[in-house]
Image (cartoon, rainbow, N blue to C red):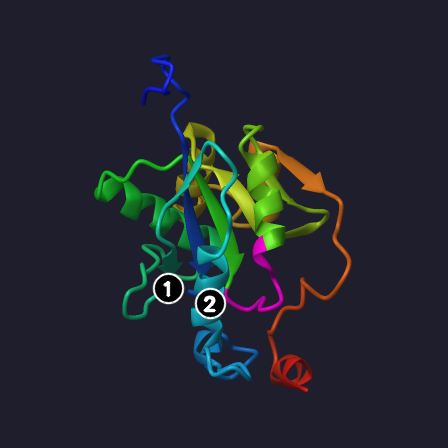
């Protein structure tokens, strides 16, 4: 890529937004991703929309969002019951299989409907300056995850049962920048029917 002055400019960081939607929804009693919000959108549609509204900082290119999970248009986990890391490992394998260049993942869970594009943009701004994961305080989702040899090694090991399959352990391995926790209910998780009722009320 060449700038108007004729100098070589820095290539854009390519970021793949990801909606983690491969959970069993056992506590909810039905597929959380298909629950409808008051505006008629499903949680899955809403999560994808929030990712699409992220205004990427200069020097960053956002790819089309991908969805983890065994559903139409989704990318099924290659290893069952491997949790969020199983979903991320499947996304990584999908990107490699289709030779889609990607430098980092911007990850949101399907069950956090109060996340805003502005919060996700904060993760991107910090993420493009570090070689570590980025999250808010001790809330490991949403997050920025660099997709490099180190993170890929851990994802592969976790999926194979050779490493602890938890986001906390992954972040401990790759390093993590924990930003100040924003105010508000942005971290509300819809795990149970009463959580969903609270949101709708």
Mark 2 and mark 1: Cα distance apart in space:
7 Å
Q: Which residue is drawn at 67% across and 63% down?
A: 186
Q: Which residue is drawn at 50% across and 66% down?
A: 110
Can residue 183 be seen at all in this image of the molecule? Answer: yes
Label 2: which secondary element:
loop
**Which region shows up in magenta?**
110-117
Q: Tell me if residue 161 is in the magenta stretch.
A: no
Q: Is residue 200 left or right of residue 150?
A: right
How many residues crowd around disc 2 within 10 Å: few (fewer than 14), some, or many (20 or more)? Answer: some
Quadrant that contains the C terminus: bottom right
- Residue 53 position, x and y percent, is 48, 57
Q: Which residue is drawn at 49% across and 47% down?
A: 106
Question: Residue 123 or 137: which is nearer the viewer?
Answer: 123
Question: Residue 30 or 106: which is nearer the viewer?
Answer: 106
Q: In this view, does 4 lie to the left or right of 107?
A: left
Residue 105 versus residue 130 in the image, above or below: below
Residue at the far front: name it: 4
Q: Which residue is drawn at 38% across and 59% down?
A: 68
**Marks 2 and 1: CB-CB under 8 Å?**
yes
Residue 18 versus residue 42 in the image, above or below: above
Instruction: Examine the image and state in which quarter residue 96 appears.
Output: top left
Residue 191: give its label: none
Q: Which of marks 2 and 1 is nearer the N terminus?
A: 2
Residue 69: give its label: 1
Question: Residue 117 or 136: which is nearer the viewer?
Answer: 117
Label 1: which secondary element:
loop
How many residues crowd around disc 1 within 10 Å: few (fewer than 14), some, or many (20 or more)? Answer: many
- Residue 136 position, x and y percent, is 68, 48
Instruction: Examine the image and state in which quarter residue 124 appears.
Output: top right
Residue 23: give its label: 2
- Residue 167 position, x and y percent, is 57, 48
């Amino acid at each position: 890529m060449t700038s108007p002055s004729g100098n070589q400019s820095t290539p854009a960081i390519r970021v793949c937004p990801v909606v983690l939607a491969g959970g069993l929804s056992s506590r909810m009693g039905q597929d959380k991703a298909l629950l409808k919000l008051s505006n008629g959108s499903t949680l899955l549609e809403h999560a994808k929309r929030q990712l699409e509204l992220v205004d990427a900082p200069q020097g960053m290119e956002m790819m089309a969002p991908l969805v983890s999970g065994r559903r139409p248009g989704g990318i099924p986990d290659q290893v069952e019951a491997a949790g969020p890391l199983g979903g991320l490992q499947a996304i990584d394998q999908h990107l490699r299989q289709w030779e889609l260049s990607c430098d980092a993942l911007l990850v949101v869970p399907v069950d956090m409907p109060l996340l805003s594009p502005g919060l996700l943009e904060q993760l991107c701004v910090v993420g493009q300056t570090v070689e570590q994961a980025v999250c808010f305080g001790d809330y490991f989702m949403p997050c920025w995850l660099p997709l490099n040899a180190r993170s890929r090694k851990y994802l592969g090991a976790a999926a194979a049962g050779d490493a602890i399959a938890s986001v906390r352990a992954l972040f401990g391995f790759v390093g993590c920048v924990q930003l100040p926790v924003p105010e508000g209910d942005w971290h509300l998780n819809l795990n149970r029917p009463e959580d969903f009722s609270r949101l709708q009320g």
